[in-house]
Amino acid sequence: MARVKTPSRIRTGTLAGLTAGALAVSGLLALGAGSASAETPAPTPRVGASQVPDHAVTGYWQNFDNGATVQTIADVQDEYDIIAVAFADATDTAGQVDFNLDPDLNYDEQQFKDDVAAKQADGKSVIVSVGGEKGSVQVSDDASADAFADSILSLMEEYGFDGVDIDLENGLNSTYMTKALEKIHSSASDVVVTMAPQTVDMQSPENEYFKTALNIKDFLTVVNMQYYNSGSMNGCDGQVYSAGTVDFLTSLACVQIKGGLDPSQVGIGTPASTNAAGSGYVEPQVVNDALDCLAKGENCGSFTPDEKWPGIRGAMTWSTAWDASDGDKWSSTVGPHVHGL
């Protein structure tokens, strides 16, 4: 996802496709710094993957100001079940990441932690997102896989995060990312693991992103592919579909399910407004139509899947801030529909 600095410009960012997120946060805290002192209450216990609703809405919270409404975690709209904090920062150690609140937000670290705990008390999952359009996190051998896993676990302990979102838009090694995520899961069996690959990364089970998702299928929460900033792609019927249409959403979701993911592990990711991505915006009602098509065989376009998948997980947007800037149009339209599936 690329950070949008102005309505017409995409800045550096996070997960491919989802647009959003230049990693231009200044200063790296030492890993583990800022941990709770004797006077500072420890984070509330994590919510855990078992608490994610059967039909869930995911939204990315922006840890930067790029012209969208500036939010605290407490400000995030109630319709969001999974809040992905974008983004963690790469350190000088291969694979290792850290999290630093953007000083421009004037967001007190303890208040941030308290806000995370309050959302979790309301049954929400709050996870840390890794990557972005320009985010360079390399997990390509055993050492970097260990460094990635250990640093994510450290951030989960320090901030109370429920898990991790993989939004790597510049390449991913399935062998070692799988090892890293399995190590995280072995230490925190209730970890929430989401992914936000670009469309091109999920065209075939032979792609590294798709392989990773299948490798961790036993504990993967959801893949919210970015159905934007994309060219035309092949649907599961072999036909080519253009972004920005209901057929694009349904036929590419079908690719993932036919490729081996459970319907409950597939979500539709779209921009919250025209300002949130370079291309691929659809009206929120189109997202609802796509979900109806996949779940019930209703409101389809020219493509109708040969099966119905009532367990389809839900939808995701970049970002909660751009949603707020657009009067909460995305969450107020898609959120109730997802929860009513």
Image (cartoon, rainbow, N blue to C red):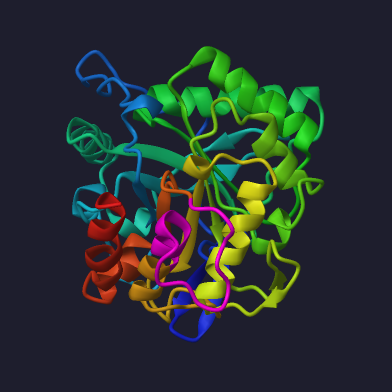
Q: Quadrant of residue 180?
A: top right
Quadrant of image for the N terminus: bottom right
* Identity of the residue drawn at 76% across and 68% down: 238
Q: Residue furthest bottom?
A: 8
Q: Position of residue 171 (x, y in %)?
A: 76, 51
Q: Depth check: 205 or 44 in front?
A: 205
Q: Quadrant of residue 254?
A: bottom right
Residue 73 visible to an observer of this rendering: yes
Tell me where the magenta segment starts and ends, as one range.
290-308
Number of numbered discs on residues: 0
* Identity of the residue drawn at 26% across and 48% down: 73
* Identity of the residue drawn at 54% across and 59% down: 24
Q: Depth check: 250 or 265 in front?
A: 250
Residue 64 visible to an observer of this rendering: no
Q: Residue furthest front?
A: 306
Q: Position of residue 213 (x, y in %)?
A: 65, 39
Q: Is residue 317 above or below residue 95?
A: below
Q: Depth check: 211 or 133 in front?
A: 211
Q: Is residue 216 above or below residue 74?
A: above
Q: Quadrant of residue 276?
A: bottom left
The question of residue 112 being in magenta is answered with no
Q: Position of residue 37 (x, y in %)?
A: 28, 17
Horizontal side of residue 177 vs 307, given as left or right: right
The question of residue 305 being in magenta is answered with yes
* Identity of the residue drawn at 31% across and 26% down: 47
**Magenta stretch secondary structure, dominant:** loop
Q: Depth check: 131 or 94 in front?
A: 131
Q: Position of residue 15 (x, y in %)?
A: 59, 56
